[in-house]
Image (cartoon, grey):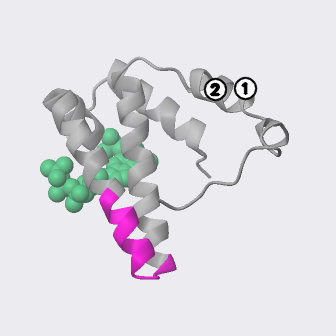
């Protein structure tokens, strides 16, 4: 079993201890622009999969995107806890927006 945090930790481990032939090492060696390109590509593939109404494709592309996002976070020295903290801050936000004026189409 591998959850997102375990995947993040695996990427951290690869950065600390590069392993020959590892795709993660390949991304780190190419640098930020390559990682950003992959995040962009994989994001687009998620959009296309959803438009194709294909759950299998969406599942596959989402896993690809999450992996590349974890590589980006590690490259940028953002910890997994940073993201968890940000998400935690948002808990309960719904209740504070219930009186918001309806969003109108332009
Ligand atoms: N989750 C993933 C994961 N998802 C996608 N990918 C790789 O992402 C690449 C995306 O495929 P593409 O066709 O878009 O890219 P490509 O043509 O192979 O290469 P480029 O476009 O980047 O040049 C594939 O090579 C996949 O193997 C991943 N590679 C690794 N992981 C995880 O990271 C762990 C460590 O992997 P290594 O670093 O390779 O040991 C693995 O055990 C997995 O758990």
- Of 2 and 34, which appears nearest the observer? 34
Say whether residue 30 is magenta: no
Tell me which corner region of the image, top left, top right, bottom left or bottom right, holds residue 15: top left
| Residue at image location 72% in from the left, 26% down from the top | 89
| Residue at image location 75% in from the left, 44% down from the top | 100
| Residue at image location 59% in from the left, 36% down from the top | 5
Which mark is on residue 28? none
Q: Residues within 10 Å of mark 1 (few under 14, many from 20)?
A: few
- Of 50 and 9, which appears nearest the observer? 50
| Residue at image location 20% in from the left, 44% down from the top | 37
Residue 38: percent from left, percent from top: 25, 47
Horizontal side of 56 relative to 20 (left or right) equals right
Per the model, the C-alpha gap separating discs 1 and 2 is: 5 Å
Please tell me whether mark 2 sits on a helix, a strand or a loop. helix
Asked whether residue 22 is in view, the answer is: no
Residue that badge 1 annotates: 89
Residue 28: percent from left, percent from top: 23, 29
Span of residues in magenta: 44-55
Please tell me whether mark 1 sits on a helix, a strand or a loop. helix
Tell me which corner region of the image, top left, top right, bottom left or bottom right, holds residue 93: top right
Horizontal side of 28 relative to 30 (left or right) equals right
Residue that badge 2 annotates: 86
């Amino acid at each position: 079993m591998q959850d997102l945090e375990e995947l993040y930790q695996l990427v951290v481990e690869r950065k600390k201890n590069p392993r020959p032939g590892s795709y993660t090492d390949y991304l780190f060696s190419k640098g930020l622009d390559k990682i950003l390109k992959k995040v962009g590509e994989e994001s687009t593939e998620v959009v296309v999969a959803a438009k194709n109404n294909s759950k299998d494709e969406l599942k596959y592309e989402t896993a690809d995107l999450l992996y590349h996002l974890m590589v980006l976070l590690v490259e940028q020295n953002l910890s997994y806890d940073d993201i968890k903290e940000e998400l935690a801050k948002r808990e309960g936000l719904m209740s504070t927006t219930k009186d918001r004026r309806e969003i109108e189409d332009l």
